[in-house]
Image (cartoon, rainbow, N blue to C red):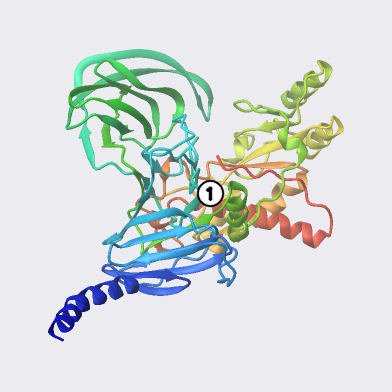
Amino acid sequence: MQKILALFSHLVPRISYLALLVLLAIPALAGEVPFGKGTLSVRQVARNAVRIQYWEQKTTSELPNWLYVKQDEVSNRDMSVDIDAARQTLCIKNKQSIPVFTATLHQMQGREATLAFQSPPDERLYGLGQFQDGYNNVRGLSRRLTQVNTQISIPMLLSSKGYGVLWNNYGLVEFNPCDRQVRMTLLDEAGLSEVVNVTTTEGGRQEVRQRNIYEATIDLAEDGDYSLLLDVGQKMARRHNLSIDGQTVLEMQNLWLPPTASVIIPLKAGHHVLRAELSKGDSPILYYNKVENQTVLRSPVATAVDYTVFVGSPDEIIAAYRELTGKAPLMPRWALGYIHCRERFHSSEEILQTANRFRSEQLPVDVIVQDWQYWGKYGWNSMRFDEDFYPDPKALTDSLHAMDMRLMVSVWSKIDKNSEVGRQMTADNYYIPGTDWIDFFNTDAAAAYWQNFSTRLVPLGIDAWWQDATEPENDDLVGRRVNNGQWSGEEVRNVYPLLVNKTVYEGLMSEKAEANSSLFTLHLIVP
């Protein structure tokens, strides 16, 4: 009997421990569970998609839902979610019960939200938008997701392992942020001086640019692949350049470059000399990290770690993404042809001469683009053609249509405050304070913008709208307040382009419905 009691007393702690593990490894169908220092919420939003949120102090965001067109929970599912509160991990399995996604960190530090998930060496990750670093597979790469001229940031990833992740934050996003950094020192040594052609509001001109030489050193503890992110320290860059121990690892030059550039390179343990030849006025910092078997998403301004995981084949993932965020209409066939764009035409006559030459020489072209400055004496983006150079814009579009050609026009969300439209906007307080950008976060301002667009430009028969500089240009939301001071620019830093295009698209759709006619075929472009 004593042996039986001893055996029982020995088993009780183990049985209790096993029971505790069962309680901690919770198959999550929906709802909220305690998790680490906070609470984890799991909601099934599509058969193959779950939205996951982690917070430590639950707050209700004052920001509208600009992203999801469908948020209702569903009961049918092709996936499962297992939460291990003891290890603070979350594992998602596909309909074959195979694990495809494992989150290892949900963290809130003040308003900074961080998510980390496993990323094995053989994984390939695609997405994040349009960048100039040349990487299709972004696994391990460090990127700073902001909207900048020539760069489009979309915090969506598609994995070769059968899942996708959409990071739900409207602000800046750090993808695989680097923990280490070094500020590069300006040397007395002069760099190359060069003459470049630049575009100004007065026209083209030449400009002399002086390069500076910067240097720094780093010491690495171990061999490995390292992700490097060079930040030139200005709102825009003219050149990205970096060499390590005399070997060039970054080289890009353009009139318009984002302030950051990224690269992954193998490095040996030890001392390394960094050298960069950059534009005058740059203040470069190099951020670096050894590539690990994880992917990290971080937002400096957030109320929760908030993301949606999709499971399945690439087609199934994109289908669910479209179901939740809205279906993009099919582009017209002519938008897939050759679009002829140059640094602005100067008159209707110049456009028609070019169009006639394309046709006479039997060169294929579907669209001709009128870039900026067509507004001439009326002021920046006054939504009016200067008749000195464009005497009859409707006749221009009719002539192009007769040649089976379309016209695309650049329209800005920045408006000269001295123009007729600008004076209206100023009187109604529709600008983002301290800027010439219309505050599209204010629905009344957006409606006023569309009203002017609708009455001044739409009747001209223009076929496609290039919503230009919708970043807004030069990251101009930083340090601003929007919607009559309700939100900080940092909270909504990456969503301004969406609201500009949403305003114009919904306005055009509304006009089409009212007219009960076929929609003017449109191509809304985010730069």
Q: Residue furthest right?
A: 402
Q: Identify the residue shown where x is 37% and y is 30%.
A: 263
Q: Is residue 362 above or below residue 108?
A: above
Residue 117 lies, in percent from the top left, at 37, 51
Residue 483 lies, in percent from the top left, at 46, 62
Taking the image as shown, residue 232 lies to the left or right of residue 170, namely left
Q: Identify the residue shown where x is 20% and y is 31%.
A: 222
Q: Can residue 83 be spotted in the picture?
A: yes
User: For this rendering, which residue is in front, 266 or 329?
Assistant: 266
User: For this rendering, which residue is in front, 149 or 415?
Assistant: 149
Residue 388 lies, in percent from the top left, at 70, 31
User: For this rendering, which residue is in front, 220 or 404?
Assistant: 220
Q: Residue furthest bottom?
A: 1
Which quadrant holds residue 372?
A: top right
Q: Identify the residue shown where x is 43% and y is 53%.
A: 101
Residue type at tag 1: Pro
User: For this rendering, which residue is in front, 272 or 189?
Assistant: 272
Quadrant showing the C terminus: top right
| Residue that label 1 marks | 497
| Total count of labels | 1
Q: Classify mark 1: residues with Cα within 10 Å, few (<14), some (14-19) or many (20+).
A: many
Taking the image as shown, residue 93 lies to the left or right of residue 230, namely right
Quadrant showing the N terminus: bottom left
Taking the image as shown, residue 436 lies to the left or right of residue 188, namely right
Q: Is residue 21 above or below residue 91?
A: below
Q: Can residue 34 be spotted in the picture?
A: no
